Image: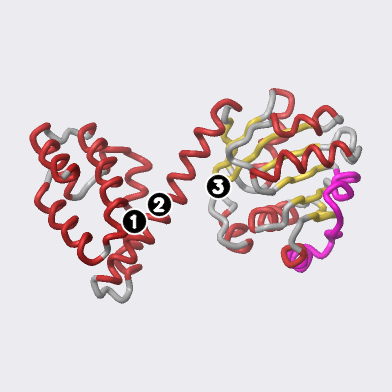
Amino acid sequence: MKRTAVIGPGRVGTALGMGLDRAGYQIVAVAGRSQGRIDEFVRRLPGARPTTAAEAARHAELVVVCVGDDTLVDLVRHVAAADAVAEGSRWLHTSGGYGVDVLEPVRLAGAAVAACHPAQTFPDPDTGFAALPGTSWAVTADEANLGWARVLVTDLRGSPVTVPAGSRTLYHAGLTVGSNATATVVTLARDLLLGAGVTDPAQFLGPLVTTSASNAARSGAAALTGPVRRGDAGTVARQLDELRTVMPEAVDAYLALSRLALRHARRAGLDDAAAGAVAAVLDE
């Protein structure tokens, strides 16, 4: 059993701690800034000793760092400066946008390093833990460390996908749009349906959004439907007029999304005349 420390016991860190525990790893220490989150982590994993980040790392064979992007660099530097990196230990962080460069201080101190990001949403630890099986992970490491990083992902019942270090920011931007932007758009759609008197928006949006997202992930612009894709400029104009009256704060978002949809619709074969008519409405 690998003696494992988790630094950052938030939703991701707690879910991964649960997953590693289930896979036979020994979770021996936890460190974080929120006492409430530490207490919640220990409630689920009572073998974990609450301590500082440096002490958590000092005697661990595996250190899993699940802190925010803006905290990661300083935290790694702090632990390395405290001479708390165990020789031969393995370190990974779960940031989507960073590669292994941010772990350079602990690598220089004798640790093996990798970046392993789960392409999954973690609304809470239990939901995130339940979603781990089958989740794809972006794994970035040098050739010497790629093997153990991929094994760790498979131990969590995930699917490792190698992503080059130079592509991590663009990769993460894609996921940010695909997940966070989608959730934002669906929230807007929900507000519109509530405004239309629909008391249970999920009844409509659940199947529609799930199918639309799945089709788009598989087929790209070819999966686009709706009035912009059909070139129904009149429908787009009526919807804009209604929004300007009942929900003016949604107009800018509707315009931005429709312009992006129009670009995709052109790629999918919308003829120039229809596309021009829709563009004229959006530019009025």
* Residue 55 forms part of the magenta stretch: yes
Tag 3–tag 1 contact (CB < 8 Å): no
Q: Position of residue 135 (x, y in %)?
A: 55, 47
Which callout, 3 or 1, points at the residue further toward the start of the chain? 3
Classed neighbour count for the residue bearing mark 1: other residues with Cα under 10 Å, few (<14), some (14–19), many (≥20): some
User: Which residue is under mark 2?
Assistant: 182
Which callout, 2 or 3, points at the residue further toward the start of the chain? 3
Q: Which mark is residue 209?
A: 1
The disc labelled 3 sits on which kind of residue? Thr
Q: Which mark is residue 67?
A: none
Q: Position of residue 171 (x, y in %)?
A: 51, 35
From which residue to which does the magenta span run? 39-60
Classed neighbour count for the residue bearing mark 3: other residues with Cα under 10 Å, few (<14), some (14–19), many (≥20): some
Residue at point 90%, 40% (across, down) = 82
Callout 3: helix, strand or loop? loop
- Left or right placement of residue 138 versus residue 280 in this view: right
User: Which residue is under mark 3?
Assistant: 135
Callout 1: helix, strand or loop? helix
Tag 2–tag 3 contact (CB < 8 Å): no
